[in-house]
Amino acid sequence: MKSAGPDDRHRGHNPLNYLVLIDQAQLFPRLYGRVLIPQAVYDELQQERTPAAVREWVANHSAWLEVKQVSVLDVRSLNN
């Protein structure tokens, strides 16, 4: 049996996934106005193992959800 890697353990464990499944994603814009998610999260929510309802919702997401490409910041540079 293959053990779960660090990425596998947390895959799909995000509030957006669960709120879409219970038809409550509209809580995000009520609380925050707009929501930014990294491209990696968007990609994760489009994978075959993600529930179909979530894949469909994300593919046709509302304007309050913005997908952004992020880069890794070297935290050592913050100490200078």
Image: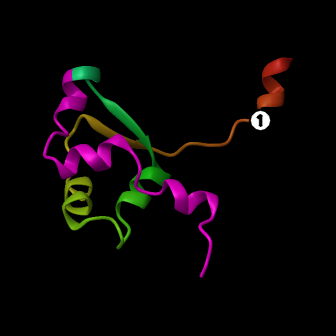
User: On the image, which quarter does residue 30 sit in?
Assistant: top left
Quadrant occupied by the N terminus: bottom right
Tell me what residue is drawn at x 67 percent, y 42 percent.
Answer: 72
Task: Give the side of residue 8 with respect to residue 58, left or right.
Answer: right
Give the extent of the magenta segment: 1-30
Q: Which residue lies under the disc numbered 1?
A: 74
Query: Residue 7: image x %, image y %?
Result: 58, 59
Instruction: Return the residue nearer the eye: 54 or 77.
Output: 54
Q: Is residue 65 above or below residue 39?
A: above
Quadrant housing residue 54: bottom left
Q: Position of residue 65 (x, y in %)?
A: 29, 39
Image location of residue 29, percent across then percent down: 22, 28
Q: Residue at x 51, y 46 (%)?
A: 69
- In terms of depth relative to the viewer, which is nearer, 7 or 43? 7
Residue reaching furthest to the right? 80
Looking at the rendered structure, the secondary structure element under dot 1 is loop
Quadrant (top left, top right, bottom left, bottom right) of the C terminus: top right
Q: Looking at the picture, how far across and down is residue 77, in whole percent?
A: 82, 26
Query: Residue at 23% of width from left, 43% of height from top?
Result: 19
Residue 4 appears in the rendering: yes
